[in-house]
Amino acid sequence: MAQVSITYCLSAMCSQHDVKELKRTLDEFPGVKSVAVNEEEAKLSIDYDDTGVSQKQLEKRLEECGYTFHEASKHSF
């Protein structure tokens, strides 16, 4: 079991509703511990246990939600 913290720079954030929906859909994954969004900087941070969800699954969901992004940082604990 590895705890991972990853931050993505998103193409853009739209509305408060979009932020809530993004957080809700990522929180549905088993292993996701927290989801934080910085709207001003268009950054998304996710803390998760990689035995419950993979980075690829999270990225696929971001793409399904219509976001383009790039990885800004990743740390394993």
Image: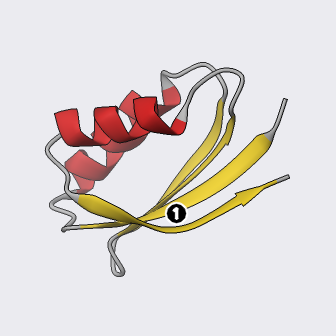
Mark 1 surroundings: few (<14), some (14-19) or many (≥20) residues within 10 A: some
Task: Identify which residue, 54 or 14, lies in the foreground.
Answer: 54
Q: How far across and down, in percent of the image, does residue 39 sit?
A: 34, 71
The coloring applied to the image is secondary structure
* 54 to the left or right of 51: left
Which quadrant, please, contains the N terminus?
top right
Q: How far across and down, in percent of the image, does residue 47 sit?
A: 66, 47
Rendered image quadrant of residue 70: bottom left
Q: Is residue 49 above or below residue 16?
A: above
Q: In this view, does 51 lie above or below 41?
A: above
Q: What residue type is labelled 1?
A: Thr
Q: Name the residue under label 1.
A: 7
* 36 to the left or right of 39: right
* 20 to the left or right of 50: left
Task: Identify which residue, 43 or 19, lies in the foreground.
Answer: 43
Residue at 20 percent of width and 57 percent of height? 68
Q: How far across and down, in percent of the image, does residue 56 sit?
A: 44, 35
Task: Identify which residue, 35 or 74, lies in the foreground.
Answer: 74
Q: How far across and down, in percent of the image, does residue 19 sit?
A: 31, 51
Name the element at disc 1. strand
* 24 to the left or right of 48: left
Q: How many marks?
A: 1
Q: Which residue lies furthest to the front in this view?
A: 56
Residue at 58 percent of width and 25 percent of height? 53
Residue at 66 percent of width and 20 percent of height? 52
Q: Is residue 19 above or below residue 2?
A: below
